[in-house]
């Protein structure tokens, strides 16, 4: 890891919350990896960890107040912003995320964020209910669209005693993200010490272009949209399953766009993190492909637009054992049988006026396979992407797709945030 982070200049922002103590370990690990680190803290953070702790770890002053009487002339939020390569906020509280999203600048972290031209990374940590609140989810979505990298929180026991999402990502996970995300370190501002300049880019990663925030409209008022999302889990014993890396991010973006257009929205979601499910939709949680099909069929009669975005497992294990399989030193054989094809099942039974849209994640011959699926499953449109492209594969915040429509249209959507992809999909099918 030292070879990746060695010599990098990282500003570590620490917000108030019990997880603040973990920032000490993160700071220490960054230093061991060869990075130069400066720490900025909110006032609330200093109630959990003394600034002296970070001064000792970094051998540098800690930024705790917008106005230091001794150094007010230096305007630390400007000088620090020019110094740093990447701004990492861990933990990131709901309050700080809200400030970043709204542009407030009343503490060291929020002033740094507005003046910082490099990449920003946030690792949220808070109670599950706060994380799931529509305001927090909207703020996270807005920050993602502006290019901020979000390291999703984990699930576990929280400080309040609840068990759920909102736990700060582990230090190892944060370190891995910083070390294995090349776009964080791309230079898109004047090189330090040089007068050369380059065109400005949105705050954050340039790999996912920012998306304009559009107002609520009523283009789908009175309509019902059903979206399937995420992976399915097909258990081959009580504790192990077949699945895929689908994160549910595209389904979440489609759900938010349907809600923005005033549609009644059903989200039938496989197992994804709770904080990826937008507020306002009727969420139906499922685990297996058969459960997903049952949920979709139960709702199908009232649906106007179906969007089959889920990465449904094509196969399941026939007759899985009821006990955990143990190692025996020998190989084992599993008999796989095909799962139901949800899009095909609905496409063949849809009523006049119902619209069905599918997705095709392909590794080769994308257009041929996509058009074949659209015909076979009787879809009105299909959205295809090449999952071998490392920028737009599973778990990415962005995508690059081609939309094929039954009327013969073919719409290429270049690399963009998934929220923008969702808008393009709804625009494309508006006249079907």
Image (cartoon, rainbow, N blue to C red):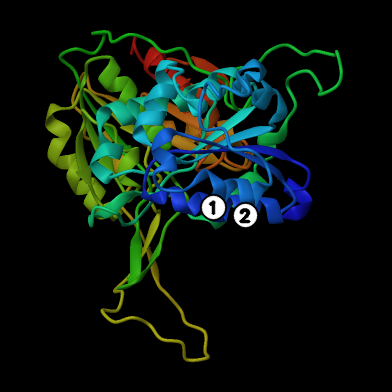
In this rendering, the answer to whether 230 lies above or below 414 is below
Residue at image point 29% right, 26% down? 135
Q: Quadrant of the N terminus?
A: bottom right
Residue at image point 60% right, 50% down? 27
User: Left or right of 173: which side holds 335?
Assistant: left
Dot 2: within a 10 Å radius of its alpha carbon, few (fewer than 14), some, or many (20 or more) residues? some
Q: Secondary structure at mark 1?
A: helix
**Percent position (x, y) of residue 307?**
32, 30
Residue 249 picture quarter? top left
Count of number-bearing discs: 2
Residue furthest out toward the front? 70
Of 6 and 387, nearer the camera is: 6
User: Left or right of 191: which side holds 283?
Assistant: left
Of 69 and 262, nearer the camera is: 69
**Percent position (x, y) of residue 144?**
48, 28
Q: Which residue is mark 1?
A: 24
Residue at image point 85% right, 14% down? 196
Residue at image point 27% right, 8% down? 217
Q: Secondary structure at mark 2?
A: helix
- Whether residue 92 is visible, yes or no, is no
Q: Which residue is mark 2?
A: 28
Of 374 and 219, nearer the camera is: 219
The answer to whether the residues at label 1 and label 2 have Cβ atoms under 8 Å apart is yes
Q: Quadrant of the C terminus?
A: top left
Cα gap from disc 1 to disc 2, whole angstroms: 6 Å
């Amino acid at each position: 890891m030292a070879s990746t982070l060695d010599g990098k200049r990282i500003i570590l922002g620490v917000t108030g919350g019990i997880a603040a103590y973990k920032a000490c370990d993160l700071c220490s690990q960054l230093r061991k990896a060869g990075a130069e680190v400066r720490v900025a803290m909110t006032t609330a953070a200093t109630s959990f960890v003394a600034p002296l702790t970070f001064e000792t770890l970094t051998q540098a002053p800690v930024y705790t107040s917008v106005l230091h009487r001794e150094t007010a002339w230096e305007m630390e939020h400007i000088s620090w912003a020019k110094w740093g390569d990447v701004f990492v906020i861990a933990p990131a509280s709901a309050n700080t995320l809200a400030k970043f999203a709204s542009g407030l600048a009343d503490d060291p972290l929020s002033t740094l964020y507005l003046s910082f031209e490099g990449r920003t990374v946030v690792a949220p940590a808070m109670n599950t209910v706060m994380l799931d609140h529509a305001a927090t989810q909207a703020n996270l979505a807005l920050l993602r669209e502006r290019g901020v990298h979000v390291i999703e929180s984990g699930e576990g026991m929280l400080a309040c005693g609840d068990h759920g999402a909102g736990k700060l990502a582990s230090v190892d996970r944060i370190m891995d993200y910083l070390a294995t995300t090349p776009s964080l370190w791309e230079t898109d501002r004047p090189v330090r010490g040089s007068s050369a300049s380059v065109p400005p880019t949105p705050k954050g990663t340039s790999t996912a272009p920012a998306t304009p925030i559009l107002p609520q409209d009523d283009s789908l008022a009175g309509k019902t949209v059903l979206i399937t999302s995420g992976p399915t889990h097909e258990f081959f014993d009580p504790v192990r399953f077949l699945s895929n890396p689908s994160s549910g991010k595209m389904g979440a973006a489609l759900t938010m766009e349907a809600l923005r257009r005033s549609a009644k929205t059903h989200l039938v979601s496989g197992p994804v993190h709770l904080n990826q499910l937008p507020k306002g939709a009727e969420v139906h949680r499922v685990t297996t492909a058969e459960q997903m099909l049952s949920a979709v069929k139960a709702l199908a009669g009232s649906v106007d637009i179906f969007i089959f975005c889920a990465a449904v497992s094509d196969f399941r294990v026939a007759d899985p054992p009821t006990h955990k399989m143990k190692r025996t030193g020998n190989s084992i054989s599993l008999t796989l049988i095909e799962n139901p094809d949800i899009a095909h099942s609905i496409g063949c039974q849809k009523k006049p006026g119902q619209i069905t849209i599918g997705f095709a994640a392909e590794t080769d011959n994308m257009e041929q396979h996509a058009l074949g699926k659209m015909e076979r499953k009787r879809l009105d449109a299909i959205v295809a992407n090449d999952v071998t492209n490392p920028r737009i594969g599973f778990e990415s915040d962005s995508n690059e797709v081609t939309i094929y429509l039954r009327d013969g249209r073919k719409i290429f959507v270049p690399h963009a945030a998934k929220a923008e992809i969702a808008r393009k999909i709804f625009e494309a099918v508006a006249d079907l």
